[in-house]
Image (spheres, rainbow, N blue to C red):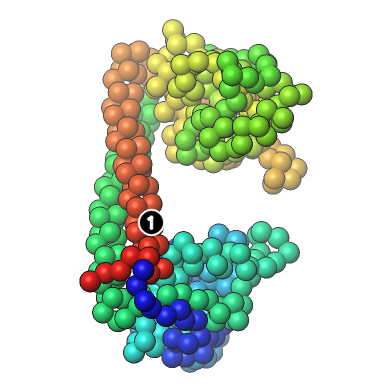
Amino acid sequence: MRDCKIVKLKDVISTKIQNGFSPLCQEECSGSWVLSLGALTGYSFDSSQIKAVSSSVNMPEEYRLKNNDILVSRSNTLDKVGRCGVYHGEIENCYYPDLMMRFRANEDIVLTKYLEIVLQSNFGRKYFQERAAGTSVSMMKINKKILEDFSFSLPTIFEQKKIIEIAQEWDSVIEKIEKLLSKKENMFDGISQKIYRKAGMKHKIQEYLSIRNEKCIPDDTIPLYSLTIEDGVTPKSDRYDREALVKDTDEKEYKIVYPGDIVFNPANLRWGALARSNELKKVAVSPIYEVLRLDASKINSDYLTFLLTSKDKIRYYSTKTEGTLVERMAVKVDAFLNFEIEIEEDIEKQKAAAEVLSTLKKEIILLRKQLEQYKLQKQGLMQKLLTGEWRVK
């Protein structure tokens, strides 16, 4: 471990930490802009996240952003508290809101980019989240004192530059994967829209799917699974303690899902919580889910699954939710089965379309996994470099 000192943020900045100003905004451009909280993504600065300031507002000069200003979010949902970014003059006449704090690094002691990397690190995010306070997770806050007292390892300027170079090399690789992933996702969406908008006759979903309502108590032969938007039907034991699961399911009957069944969450269907089970065995899912049996003799399973999870269909589901309260709004299974979809009648054409989409989907899944691995590897490396466990020469 290298011999370097531990400093507090307040000892390495050249300006006071200052909260911003939230002016009246409007659609019409007045020549001045204010950042929205979305500008701080947690990994970079998004200059597209701005709002137009009303021409009736006299913006104080002290809130105008300058090149190399460091911004930290102070108030919002827990995952956004403490997000950091550096402003590099991307927008002329730009100001920052009250939900952010601004300061500048003392470049004789710490480089701006190095300080940004430290603040965005795992231990930096953890520090702010552990100290955030509020009445609910939807409105958490940190203050100037918490930011001032943030402690970190400070190496020499030479080593800071080396660590920045290493981080930028990793960022370059990650950015290339992100661009390729975005290209593949756009290609998938474009082909999907082309295929399904050229489909033929309208049919009700109930012609191909029917309700399965078999129940069981999960055990080793029929394990408990869950449904996520990102991963589909996946083992719940991967995310929860096994003993807690057994205790939780002792007195409950869960729904059985057969291989190839479609599962959806009525409350989250509007966000895409629908997937086909690709497991080769029966599994159990929460009774809050709907389980549907698919008649593979009438339609290609892949074709229907891609259709039901297409962006157009997800947008459609969001218009069909029912309920008196937002948090209780859902798409009922009977209504879902009565939805009409346009289907290509030729099974062979269905199969050909599904094969194209399946190939792209596999490439997208592989790129997502690769991207996640690179991000985790970078995090692990930066953790060792930023804490002084490893040193650079």
- Which residue is rendered at x = 40% and y = 73% of the image? 116
Q: Quadrant of residue 115?
A: bottom left
Q: Residue 117 versus residue 66: which sits nearer the camera?
A: 117
The answer to whether residue 190 is visible is no
Whether residue 13 sits left or right of residue 391 in the image: it is right
**Residue 259 appears in the figure:** yes
Q: Position of residue 19 (x, y in %)?
A: 56, 82
- Nearest the viewer among 355 and 162 is 162
Name the residue tied to disc 1. 380
> What is the quadrant of residue 47 in the picture?
bottom left
- Which quadrant holds residue 107? bottom left
Toward the top, the furthest residue is 297
**Residue drawn at the location 51% of the way across and 90% of the way down:** 16
Residue at 33% over, 65% down? 390
Closer to the camera, 118 or 226? 118
At 67% from the left edge and 22% from the top edge, which residue is drawn? Answer: 254
User: Which is nearer the eye, 246 or 29?
Assistant: 246
For the image, the number of numbered tags is: 1
Which amino acid type corresponds to the residue marked 1 in the rendered image?
Answer: Gly
Q: Secondary structure at mark 1?
A: helix
Is 349 positioned to the left or the right of 336 in the image? left
Q: Is residue 372 above or below residue 50?
A: above
- The correct choice, above or below, for 102 with respect to 44 in the image is below
Label 1 CA crowd tier, 10 Å (few <14, some 14–19, many 20+): few
Instruction: From this view, report whether residue 385 is shown above or below residue 227.
Output: below
Q: Position of residue 169 (x, y in %)?
A: 24, 62
Residue 317 at x, y percent in the picture? 56, 36
Quarter holding the N terminus?
Answer: bottom left
Q: Residue 355 placed where, x, y %? A: 30, 23
Name the image quarter holding the C terminus.
bottom left
Left-right relation of 329 to 123? right
